[in-house]
Structures are given as structure tokens and as C-alpha cells.
Amino acid sequence: MVNEGRGRLFRRKDGKYLIYLPKDLAEDSMFPFKGSDSIFVKVSFKLGDKKLLIDKWEEPAAEQ
């Protein structure tokens, strides 16, 4: 099981930022994001903390 790996955050020439995840990490059977080549994620952080939180983007449920 691979539950950590060395990735990279880098800035492209067009000014966008990308996060690279190692293949072994992203293809591990326990990796929390499954099923597609591209998904929307929510990225957040707490002030003063040197960690990023990445969650699957969940659309708000439609009110009935």
C-alpha cells in the first residue's frame, strides 16, 4: 500500500498552478479518488498551517 509519495506543485507558463501526484500513489487501491481521468476537487488550507486539504468537489444537493 502506498499512502504517501513525493509530489510537486508548480506554476505553468500561463500562470496556472498544477499539483503532480506520483503514479504509484494515485493508482493505489486505497487512493480516495476513483473512476476518472479528471475530477473537480476542493483545495483549502488553514492560515499558519503548511498543509493543503484536497476533497472531492460535491455539488450542493438541490432543494426540494
Image (tube, grey):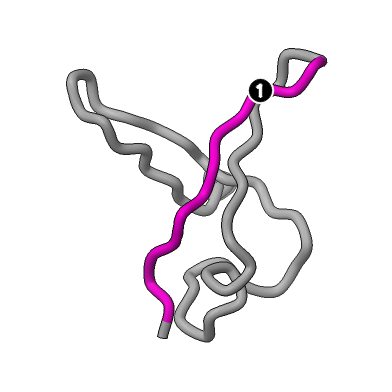
Name the chief secondary structure element in magenta.
Answer: loop
**Residue drawn at the location 81% of the way across and 15% of the way down:** 14
Relative to 22, say whether 7 is above or below: above
Question: Could one spot residue 64 in this view of the protein?
Answer: no
Range of the magenta residues? 2-13
| Relative image position of residue 43 (x, y in whole percent) | 47, 36
Question: Could one spot residue 57 in this view of the protein?
Answer: yes
- In the orientation shown, which residue stands out farthest toward the left? 48
Q: Residues within 10 Å of mark 1 (few under 14, many from 20)?
A: few
Q: Give the quarter of the figure containing the N terminus.
A: bottom left
The amino acid type, in three-letter code, at marker 1 is Arg
**Residue drawn at the location 51% of the way across and 50% of the way down:** 7
Relative to 1, say whether 19 is above or below: above
The tally of labels here is 1
Q: Which residue is mark 1?
A: 11
Q: Nearer the viewer, residue 9 or 59?
A: 9
